[in-house]
Amino acid sequence: MSDVRHKLSEQLERALLALLERAGDADPPPPVELEVPRQKGHGDFSCNVAMQLAKRLRKSPREIGQDLVAELADGEGMVGRAEVAGPGFINVWLAEDRWLDVLRGILEAGARYGRADAGKGRAVQVEFVSANPTGPLSTGHGRQAVLGDCIARLLDFSGWNVTREYYFNDGGRQMRVLGESVKARYLESLGLAAPAPETALEDPEKAWVEAVDGKPVRFPKDGYRGDYIRDVAEKLRGDQGDDLADEPATGAFLAAAKDVIFAEIRATLDSIDIRFDEYFNEKSLYDGGQLDEVLAQMRDAGMIYDAEGAVWFKATALGLDRDRVVVRSNGEPTYILPDIAYHRDKYRRGFDTIIDVQGADHVEQFPFVRAAVGVLGFDPDRLEIVMHQFVTITSGGEKVKQSTRRATFVTVDELVEEVGADVFRFFMVERKAEGHLDFDLDLAKDRNWRKNPAYYVQYAHARSHGIERKAAGAGASVPSADAFDASRLDLPEEIELIRKLGEFPGLVERATDVRAPHHVAYYLRDLAGLFNPYVQDGKRHRVVSEDAELTAARLALMRAAQIVLANGLWLLGLSAPEQM
RNA sequence: GCGCCGGUAGCUCAGCUGGAUAGAGCAUCAGGCUUCGAACCUGAGGGUCGGGGGUUCGAAUCCCUCCCGGCGUACCA
């Protein structure tokens, strides 16, 4: 698999060194990079090192390529043939039995196939979602949830010790307004207040002053208008009765809202198979005096100054474009100070790598946090951000309008109810994070399931099980890793399939390195795109046939594909059904 | 204005550290599959990779510049 690639690349390196030595060139050689060519006619691997050396050796790339091919001692019988092509590519075809080794490797590794120890058990924290408990999770949160979870899965698969963390703030203005919103609905429910008319809500200045039908309107400016607020109010009446009219909004009302909403958020996450290891409350930073400590440390480092009655972080001294207020003139810290303290806490917990997954609207402060962390003596390079753009939903060729203020946004719950957790996850992770995500609702909820890429992949997996069931009915079973004759798999589509299966570990490695799970989704689509046609064309090559030896070999191939599909689906957090 | 992210087929998007004829799904058109492993399969059309310059053996990919779109640019979180 990737071993094959590594070995081949080492062989080429040796040849390269020998070549340079003979040319009297003692400088270090350029790295040997092997790629899988797009064109089938260009070999299993292709190398461009000859072209890179042309200038240095003052020889034509093709000539160098020829020398390298001649030098390529093949002690292990790995190379089938190698030739120079085009402007100077060295194309290598592996000996066929090398590819067949791949198959054995997959069967032996099973669910571990593609796993790596690159992480070496080091600790990594992935922080994502981190939505404050003010309402149900929106599609944007949903994307972040799936993205973060898949990154965590990739890291876990690559040998990291992963902690998933959710950071939240249940204090502050936002939450006070939430409590007031609940109280208003509570009073409305008791007939002690009137609901604000829509027009008043559009013009929030009015909401406080005008009575409706002789009753006061208690709905706050910028209040939360979703129906879930009424649900919280009703629940509060049920649990604690109708005598809370004189309670402050920040008391029982806020507490109830927080509890109910958080429970709902957790249920939502649970429904898409996402679970956190830690929930970190911003308040604990205040309680523990950590904000003052951070401020003092930064002041000692000369990165804090006072001006205009406020306290400033001298970020310009670190190359950033402006300084920032960390404590307002009224003595309240701005949001960035707890954020810095939070990240200090992450470092102190000993994570080797810290990954923040954040929406595009929230990334502006990241450079400041990163710089501040450096001031506090930590290595900023261990702190990464994965940014993602927003989600739009398209249905019937039209974008569905979403507005949080007006509570017309689509929630994760609604979407999951319509399309199911698997399709939801696949669609959310399929696109690269930096781009906008257009969620095609019509395609996602297509009940015929024909065109839906999520089902296409799952179906391939289910099919492999179907074949095994079929084989069992005919008395054939999947052979163990060394009990089949892999050389019987000589059809071009079989070799191509095996080759694709062999790419999986490298693909996973790359996707992990760049924290981009969408590569896995595309890989799976490609793989299913090879698998489904192969199985489809049952007239040319039935897996289960009279030829017991051939049947065994093909069953091994089917099982290998099944393993890779299952492992890939796991990485995306999708189920791998045995039948559909 | 400045910053970040996008601009690739009619639509939605891939394209690994620059590589050889730019790929996939959907949609469209033409066929196959008369349920066996068929929720599938085969084929076709469709592109000046936003425009222009540059770097080099070679650029969708790197640099510069301009245009378009999203987000951000608070002593709000």
Image (cartoon, helix red, strand yellow):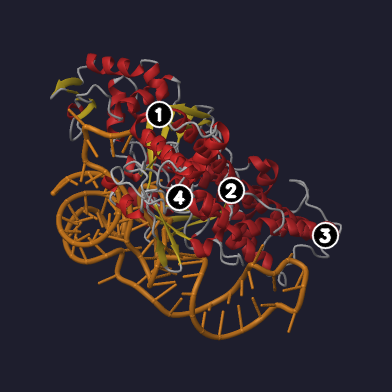
Label 4 to label 2, Cα distance in Å?
24 Å
Residue A556 visible: yes
Same subunit, tags 4 and 2: yes
Other residues around mark 4 within 10 Å, as few (<14) / some (14–19) / many (≥20): many
Label 4, label 1: how many angstroms apart (C-alpha)? 32 Å
Side of A46 where A576 appears, left or right? right
On the same chain, marks 4 and 3? The answer is yes
Type of residue at label 3? Ala
Which type of secondary structure does the marked residue at label 4 adopt? helix
Task: Choose the circle earlier in sequence order: 3 or 1.
Answer: 1
Q: Amino acid at mark 4?
A: Thr
Q: CA distance from mark 4 to mark 3?
A: 52 Å
How far is mark 3 from mark 1, CA to CA?
A: 79 Å
Mark linked to residue A248: 1
Q: Position of residue A323 (x, y in %)?
A: 18, 30
Secondary-structure class at tag 1: loop
Disc 2 on helix, strand or loop? helix
Chain letter for mark 4, please. A
The span from disc 3 to disc 2 (Cα, nearest Å) is 30 Å
Chain identifier of the residue bearing label 2 in the image: A
Location of residue A541 with respect to A316 vertically, above or below: below
Question: Which percent across, then down, holds residue B65?
Answer: 15, 55
Q: Which residue is mark 2?
A: A568
Q: Residues within 10 Å of mark 2 (few under 14, many from 20)?
A: many
Q: Which residue is mark 3?
A: A548
Residue named by callout 4: A139
Q: Is residue A14 above or below residue A452?
A: above
Q: Residue at x 20, y 20 (%)?
A: A304
